[in-house]
């Protein structure tokens, strides 16, 4: 899993999995400024698909 962020002005994104299951993955990303203050936060849910055989 990869996320791309623009780090302008010293913003620092940190992404952490909140839940990793058999069907879904939930990831929270927090963005902090140079002084460590939280400036943004997002959560995303991704479906986990089984590989096709054949």
Image: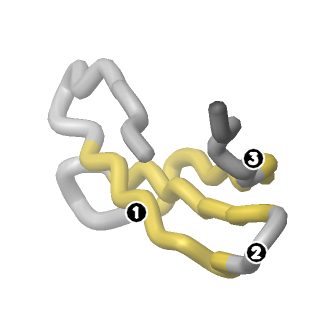
Q: Which residue is mark 1?
A: 37
Precedes in sequence: disc 3 or disc 1: 1
Q: Nearer the viewer, residue 49 or 44?
A: 49
Q: Residues within 10 Å of mark 3 (few under 14, many from 20)?
A: few
Residue labelled with disc 3: 49
Looking at the picture, the colour scheme in use is secondary structure
**Which of the two discs, 3 and 1, sits closer to the camera?**
3
Measured from the top left, where is residue 2 in percent x and y?
A: 38, 39
Count of labels in the image: 3
Q: Are marks 3 and 1 in contact (CB under 8 Å)?
A: no
SS category of the residue bearing label 2: loop
Residue at the (79%, 63%) spot, across then down: 24
Residue carrying label 2: 22
Task: Give the SS element for disc 3.
Answer: loop
State the image quarter where residue 54 is shown.
top right
Q: Is residue 44 shown above or below 2?
A: below
Question: Is residue 6 or residue 38 the one in the foreground?
Answer: 6
Q: Position of residue 32 (x, y in %)?
A: 37, 54
Q: Residue at x 24, y 26 (%)?
A: 7
Indicate left or right for 17 with 31 as reference. right
N-terminal of the two: label 1 or label 2? 2
Q: Is residue 30 left or right of residue 2?
A: right
Q: Is residue 17 above or below residue 11?
A: below
Quarter of the image where one finds residue 15? bottom left
Query: Disc 3 or 2, which lies upstream in sequence?
Result: 2
Given contact means CB atoms under 8 Å apart, are the residues at marks 1 and 2 in contact?
Answer: no
Q: Residues within 10 Å of mark 2 (few under 14, many from 20)?
A: few
Say which element carries label 1: loop
3D distance between C-alphas at marks 3 and 2: 9 Å
Mark pair 3, 1: CA separation: 36 Å
Quadrant of the image occupied by residue 4: top left
């Amino acid at each position: 899993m990869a996320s791309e962020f623009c780090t302008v002005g010293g913003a620092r994104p940190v992404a952490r999995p909140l839940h990793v299951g058999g069907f879904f993955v939930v990831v929270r990303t927090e963005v902090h400024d140079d002084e460590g203050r939280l400036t943004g936060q997002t959560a995303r849910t991704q479906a986990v698909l089984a590989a096709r055989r054949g």
